Image (tube, rainbow, N blue to C red):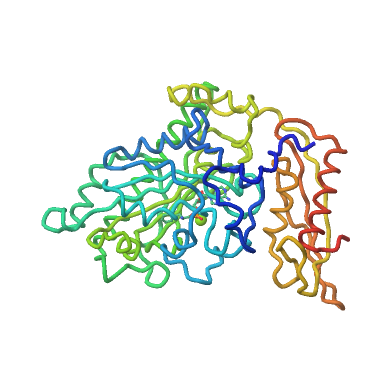
Amino acid sequence: LRESIKPIPQESGIHPLWPSKNEYDEWYNVPATIANAISERLHVQKDHPISITRSIIESKFPQPLFKYYNEEFPVVSTYRNFDSLGFPADHPGRSKTDTYYINKNTVLRTHTSAHQREIFKENKSRGFLISADVYRRDAIDRSHYPVFHQMEGAQTWDRNEVPNGDLAAAVWKDFEALPKHSMVVEDPNPTVHPERNPLQAEHHSMEEVEAMAAHLKRSIELVVAEIFTRAKAAATASDPNYVDEPLRVRWIEAYFPFTSPSWELEVFWQGDWLEVLGCGIVKQDVLDGADMHQQAGWAFGMGLERIAMLMFEIPDIRLFWSKDQRFLSQFEGVSDNLDRLRRFIPFSKYPACYKDVAFWLRSSSSSAGGGLSANSQDFHENDVMEIVRDVGGDVVEDVKQTDSFTHPKTGRRSLCYRINYRSLERTLTNEEANEYHENVRQALVKQLGVELR
Ligand code: FA5
Ligand code: MG
């Protein structure tokens, strides 16, 4: 039944660099399915769509101006993942419900920005790209997965090295040298916002920030334009009558503790805006931490799955983890010859099987086994997501809350979730789905201490 779920790892068999058990503490919350993912390294697996996507993006940031890093190990200190980037002590991203911990001071990185400071420090080029697997306890749906891949990029200018010390002029010159594109880009907001996205006034002039922002945005737009050119060529190769829809992209304001001002880029895809990356002007603290006091520049972090989904028309993020030859064979030979890139042809969808589970949260704060707890105050939906995923693996397509109810007299809260069981590889029998669901119900009781309704 659990054939599509990887086996529970042996005591020390996760990875040679995985921390030993005596480093775990009461913060440890990494399920076996997640720990096993660190050995997959899809971003460097030849002919894997994530790896193909990575190399196409790399081609837009050429060496030696940029140096590429693809080997950073995912277990990092909380200092690297959070503190070195200026995350406040009470930032929600640090909570156990959002992040996988080995122990109080060690996590699975939640983003490639975890390596910014050290790579700024050791890198001798003016730019870098870091591609890697990242880990988040997140909702489950077609575009969210608890393990995914990001590419971090940065480029800096050194005030001591630009002609006449004129940073803005040097950046504008580099901007003018970038290729043009014909995409229509919505970008309605001013470059800075006095409260939400201020100029780092002690460090930059407004003109410098305008120049760096323009350079950053153009550099990223060129990636998107390349992806869509490839996507269109692939679609036309499979279907000569293919008519593409006009591409819509927009810059929106964003917030990150380590950039200001900051933006996100969204692409209109299948009827909805899909966020593909975050970026901004690097905070001087981060550069100072890397002894780059005279430098200024930009950084971005993009979701490689999201970009690959756009380019190959891959409909479901779980597919990237498939070992099914009907998936993998469609990308064979593409790494060596990008002209072979084709749209993904979905194999037929197997039937969905919806099952509901309803339960009462505990009203007391007594703690259940497993370190999780589900009394009404500190209940977090990600705990449900993770239990479901741990039991059902990739057979769970998505999980949605369908009801929430607080008893008027007792004040107890009840929740109902609808789970969609659907294998990407075969039809699940009703018996199998029932067995998964029963295991989910038992795990919710055992690990969260809920009372089933
Ligand atoms: C970050 O992770 C920042 N570190 C990005 C950044 C880097 C900003 C450098 C400024 C400078 P965010 O949480 O928005 O930002 O994630 C970046 C991208 O990762 C998203 O835009 C999305 O494309 C992708 N992403 C986020 N969560 C998931 C998920 N669960 N599954 C798949 N992709 C995801
Ligand atoms: Mg975001």
User: In what quadrant of the picture does the C terminus appear?
Assistant: bottom right
Along the line of sight, which residue is nearer the eye, 239 or 451?
451
Tally of numbered tags = 0
Q: Quadrant of residue 188?
A: bottom left
Name the outermost residue toward the left.
164
Q: Quadrant of residue 424?
A: top right
With 246 as the anchor, is 214 left or right in this view?
left
In the image, residue 369 sits, relative to residue 116, either above or below, namely below
Along the line of sight, which residue is nearer the eye, 117 or 384?
117
Picture coordinates of residue 180, whole percent (x, y)? 30, 40
In the image, residue 329 sits, relative to residue 231, either above or below, namely above
Picture coordinates of residue 270, whole percent (x, y)? 58, 42
Q: Which residue is depicted at the point 63% across and 39% down? A: 316
In the image, residue 367 sits, relative to residue 287, either above or below, namely below
With 33 as the anchor, is 415 left or right in this view?
right
Q: Which residue is depicted at the point 61% across and 45% down? A: 12
Q: Which residue is depicted at the point 59% across and 27% down? A: 328
With 124 as the anchor, is 139 left or right in this view?
right
User: In what quadrant of the picture does the N terminus appear?
Assistant: top right
Q: Which residue is depicted at the point 76% across and 74% down? A: 365
Picture coordinates of residue 100, whole percent (x, y)? 59, 56
Picture coordinates of residue 56, whole percent (x, y)? 41, 34
With 439 as the anchor, is 235 left or right in this view?
left
